Image: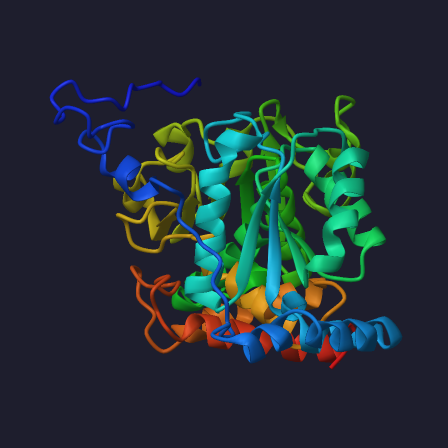
Amino acid sequence: MAAEIVNPRSDSAPDGDDTHGEFFDPAFALHRGGKMEIRATVPVRDRDDLSLAYTPGVAKVCSAIAEHPELVHDYTWKSQVVAVVTDGSAVLGLGDIGAEASLPVMEGKAILFKQFGGVDAVPIALDCRGVDEIVETVARLAPSFGGINLEDISAPRCFEVERKLQERVDIPVFHDDQHGTAVVTLAALRNAARLTGRALGELRAVISGAGAAGVAIARILVEAGIGDVAVCDRKGIVSADREDLTAVKRDLAGFTNKAGLSGTLGAALDGADVFIGVSGGTVPEEAVATMAKDALIFAMANPNPEIHPDVAHKYAAVVATGRSDYPNQINNVLAFPGIFAGALQVRASRITEGMKLAAAEALAAVVADELSAECVIPSPFDERVAPAVTAAVAAAARAEGVARR
């Protein structure tokens, strides 16, 4: 569905003072001039400071790094900064709006990195669309950064961009639309299962949506030991007997749907324990009613969940959404700041499946002693979240041999 375009200008604003509509919509006032700035961490007050921060003092540091490249982590910002990279092709629910229009979102992501994880981040919007173009461009920028957060790149290109870029660089590459969503979903599902007296291995899940988030959620659930999971796209259950599958969906069919289900989303939901929505659209109430007793419904489309919470609560023991005005918000900000903080802390060369699983376990543990139907996942403002995820990811990186300190 196309986004409705609303003119931000206010006809009633004071003359000469409402260039971009601040008096009409406070979002425009907040964004005026952007949401970020670069600030020095050292003083430049006099000639001595200048000679140390720049020439001639800086030349000694440059020479040392040239002789011992690993010193770049100690004497530059590389070890604490992430590039937030997009091509503007799949921005929020707005779709393909282009590089420049994506910048407010990338700035927003960068300030969340800083606010919630203490990680500096730089927004980079690329004016290119080819997989190899994106990979080549980011790979050439990589020496300036300790990690790459890919953002809002449309599927299926996002899978190839992430894979090829990680093959090119020796720093973590993380597509948050995939893996951040997957980590937080798994954490919430672990707690929801625990709350209802079940283990993950006892659950059969249905995922509506076979895009970036749906594929990543399916993969992490299988890695975590889910009983079974079926993924549905617009044409129904992704199964090996379908002849219309892309390469990504053929791979997906290979590790999901052990029960061999076929047919519609409604057929998949019959008797299912878990619904996970990352697709939009609407699931009919009569299909929801066929789910197993004490179902777990995570309807995460924004702003309109696939199953409205009022309907979901009729049939589910636990309900989660992607919205901040309902309990149990599945919000990526619970994951990506701590994941990168942990990876940067140990100078990891990549983010492994084990590191993602560790992040999910740590996130779930934050509220393990406080579980209720309205609390299976922490609030983004819970100050315990980022330290817990950071420590778990760092430890997992060391255990898996991708840490360099």
Residue 401 visible to an observer of this rendering:
no
Whole-percent x, y for residue 217 in the image: 59, 49
Question: Which residue appears at 29% of the width and 54% of the height?
Answer: 327
Question: Which residue appears at 40% of the width and 27% of the height?
Answer: 282
User: Quick one: 315 or 277, which is closer to the camera?
Assistant: 277
Q: Is residue 381 above or below residue 325?
A: below
Question: Which residue appears at 58% of the width and 24% of the height?
Answer: 234
User: Quick one: 380 or 316, which is closer to the camera?
Assistant: 380
Whole-percent x, y for residue 275 in the image: 47, 44
Residue 50 visible to an observer of this rendering:
yes
**Residue 290 in which image quadrant:** top left
**Residue 225 in which image quadrant:** bottom right
Residue sitting farthest toward the right? 67
Q: Is residue 197 above or below residue 165?
A: below
Whole-percent x, y for residue 30 in the image: 29, 43
Quadrant (top left, top right, bottom left, bottom right) of the C terminus: bottom right
**240 relative to 186 in the view: left or right:** right
Question: How many numbered callouts?
Answer: 0
Question: Which residue appears at 65% of the width and 69% of the height?
Answer: 54
User: Quick one: 124 or 319, which is closer to the camera?
Assistant: 124
Whole-percent x, y for residue 153 in the image: 62, 36
